[in-house]
Image (tube, rainbow, N blue to C red):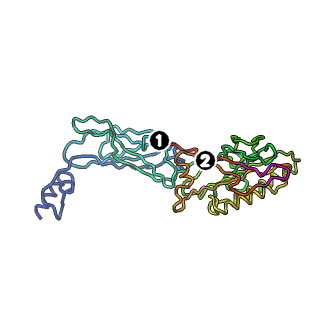
Amino acid sequence: MKKVFFACVSAILLSIGCNAFAQKCPPNCTGVTTPVPVGRLYDLKIVSIEPAAALVEHQDITVAFELTVKKYGVVGELKSQQGQVCGVNHRGTCKTIAQLDPDRTYNGQITITAPAAAKNADIAIVLEAAQVCPPGVECFGTETLAEGHSIRPVAADYVVNIDSFTIRHTRAVHEDTLEMNLSAQVPGQRSAEKGACDFVPKPPTYCVTKVKQGDYNNGTYPAKGSTVGLYRLIPEVEPEFTFEYHLINLGTPYEQRAAEKIFNGISDAAAAFMSAYTSASGGSGGGDAWKQVNDFTHKLNALQFGGCDGPVLVGAAALRNQALPGGEASTLDAVTKGTGRYTNTQHSEDYDEINSQDGCGKSPRYDVTYSIVRTTWQPWP
């Protein structure tokens, strides 16, 4: 017992605990100690993040940090050391600390880039210093001395764009006079409220209606003025993202009351369709989705159009924002994470036949190519 006592007292007299001197301390201390060389311990913490509201991926954010430096060991001389606090991958600014003195706390702030969208995104900062090289070896890298982390939700922004349409057969005998309608919504957000298409001021624009495309026969043409957004979603928080579009041939002049009746009918049918069309009810391509698009198509085609007017293509898509087991690769986040864009083409025959009036062209055959563009996307190393 005396050997144990004197071994630990000797350690205390050297201003460090017994653990720093011996691999084994009481009750197994042998009295043989190994002095520990001096060094520094670092504790890096994120104190606050601005803005405090929900973050958007790759935006500039201000991170306030606290760095505490401690000394350990008793043998040797503690050399001077400089460090810097930075964001991961050095996206943003760094704060240089000229001298990392022990028993001191340093406070500061840096500007970094928010990480990619996620429900629990890891906002990380690091304390770095010049790499220590072995004697006679030249090196130029840095080493990480400490890390600080904070978990926050980070959103991504999206728009929907109709890129182009292809006519394989017109509804009219020769040319269709086309107008495009497009709307999108996120359940629980402002875009899903009643009358969202009429919200002022704009942007954001949640609907575009009666966008004139021109007079066309068979061929492929770029769509004009058919973009809606922005829509902001945090992965695994909002349930889904849904949009619908319909392209209509409107080449016959209408007197005001007849035109109002037609356009009100289109608007009412579109609103009802958007309310019913969800991924939960098959909106990602199930049989119920086919029935909903089919019903919407027939409601449009049943309106009192003159001449050869009427819908030529109706389409919709609902992409889940919350992954189902086994469906992680098909979420909105997943399909746009690689390039910032998801593009798809739908065909009129994907759904039910659209019958044209007697004396007009055959049932129209159209394709539409659309894109969901992740406007906040950036490649992340």
- Report the amino acid beneath label 1: Thr
Magenta stretch bounds: 355-365
Magenta stretch: includes residue 364: yes
Dominant SS type (magenta): loop
Q: Secondary structure at mark 2?
A: strand
Query: Does the magenta-highlighted stretch encompass residue 32?
Result: no
Q: Which residue is mark 2?
A: 343
Q: Position of residue 69 (x, y in %)?
A: 32, 47
Q: How far is the residue under mark 2 from the one under mark 1?
A: 34 Å
In this rendering, is residue 236 above or below 208?
A: below
| Quadrant occupied by the N terminus | bottom left
The residue that label 1 is drawn on is 111
Going 75% across and 42% down the picture, which residue do you hit? 213
The residue at 85%/53% (across/down) is: 358
Rendering coords of residue 273 (x, y %): 72, 58
The mark nearer the N terminus, 2 or 1, is: 1
The residue closer to the viewer here, 221 or 380, is: 221
Number of other residues with Cα within 10 Å of mark 1, as a class: few under 14, some 14 to 19, many 20 or more: some
Q: Based on the displayed image, in which of its 4 quarters is residue 32 positioned?
A: bottom left
Could you say which quadrant of the image residue 330 lies in? bottom right
SS for dot 1: strand
Residue 190 at least partly seen: no
Quadrant position of the C terminus in the picture: top left
> 333 or 9, which is in the foreground?
333
Quarter occupied by residue 295:
bottom right
Give the x, y percent position of residue 168.
72, 46
Three-letter amino acid code of the residue under disc 2: Thr
